[in-house]
Image (tube, grey):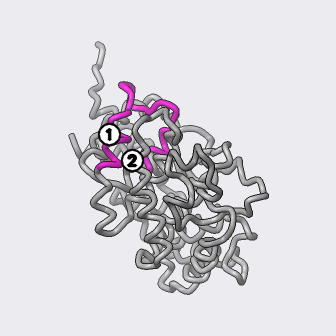
Amino acid sequence: MNTVVTHSEGIEAAIERLAEFFSTAVTRQGILARKALGRPLPSDEDHRDRLVRELRRETRLDGSVGGAVVPTIWRAIELMDLGHGGDQSGTIRVMGWVLGLQGQPGAFGEECTDTRHSHKVCEHYIAGFFSPAPPNQRLAPISLPNGKVFRAEGAARFATSCLALRAALMAGHEKRPMVQQHLESLVLLQDVWTDWAGYFAPDMIVSALGAMALAPPPHREKLPRAAAFVAEHQAKDGTWPNADLFHTLEALLAAGTAEARIAIKRAAPALLARQRPDGTFGSTAQEERALIGLRALLIAIRDR
């Protein structure tokens, strides 16, 4: 006798595979996954405190992780995700290093050219971006913690700056003048996002959405427009043309708007098609993508 598996049953089974994968993981992703599932372990608080201590030990006195930009920005986000372990001093030191990247040479948008000016991506229009490297130093390719790789130099600098802005907003630095300038620049750039295959690559737009998702008023009022632009370019199979699925889902999850939640729900078939028997979605950024996928599937099952 053939058994027909419904869409909801497929999602529930996928969630259970992810729950099993994360059931004993003593990592940041494991702790956050069990929290999202409502199945924390009695020992999770101890695991969290141990992880925070380890993450702090890996940072230099200047707050950086080996002087590397993306790992340092991510370290701040990791510590905040884990709740600082009851002490914010380590995060404050890391964020001090990250904030020091603003106003330095090499930020996205420097040096006006006719092309950049016509697309409003020069210093005459935008400001406040973080500089991940001096202008004469090659940055690309860079890999984000979610597994997305940026190979073009301009895109790599833009995406890194958006990740840093995300950390700054999480840390409560939204009133800093340069942070506000960065946010205002992203709001302005929405006028340039008229074509999914235009001047801005789709994954750059997604990076901007992920940062804008944490913006306070009045900038947050512009968030539905950005989320809707991403959502309306979703393909029938739930993916996005020329954009990384998990990078996009991470940004939409952060946005949390009605448009974002609808797009996340529509992406469920794409996640189900990519899930492996162990619950994950491949070896690239395995735990981080599994966490993103879990959060997306939980939205899909709850918004039935």
Q: From the viewer's perspective, is 89 left or right of 291?
A: right
Mark closest to the chain's N terminus, 2 or 1? 2
> Could you classify mark 1 by the number of other residues whose Cα lies within 10 Å: few (under 14), some (14-19), or many (20 or more)?
many
In front here: 254 or 114? 114
Q: Which mark is residue 156?
A: none
Query: In this rendering, is residue 15 above or below 208?
Result: above
Task: Report which residue position mark 2 lands on.
Answer: 191
Residue 179 rendering spot, x and y as whole percentages: 48, 71
Q: Does the image show residue 186?
A: yes
Query: In this rendering, is residue 158 above or below 219?
Result: above
Query: In this rendering, is residue 159 above or below 169?
Result: above
Task: Report which residue position mark 1 lands on.
Answer: 263
In front here: 232 or 180? 180
Q: Give residue 216's quadrant in the image.
A: bottom left
Q: Does the image show residue 55?
A: no
Residue 256 rendering spot, x and y as whole percentages: 31, 54
Amino acid type at circle 1 is Ala
> Could you classify mark 2 by the number of other residues whose Cα lies within 10 Å: few (under 14), some (14-19), or many (20 or more)?
few
Assign the N terminus to one quadrant of the image. top left
x 70%, y 74%: residue: 58
Outermost residue toward the left in this view = 304
x 53%, y 68%: residue: 128
- State which region is magenta: 225-250
Q: Give residue 102's quadrant in the image.
A: bottom right
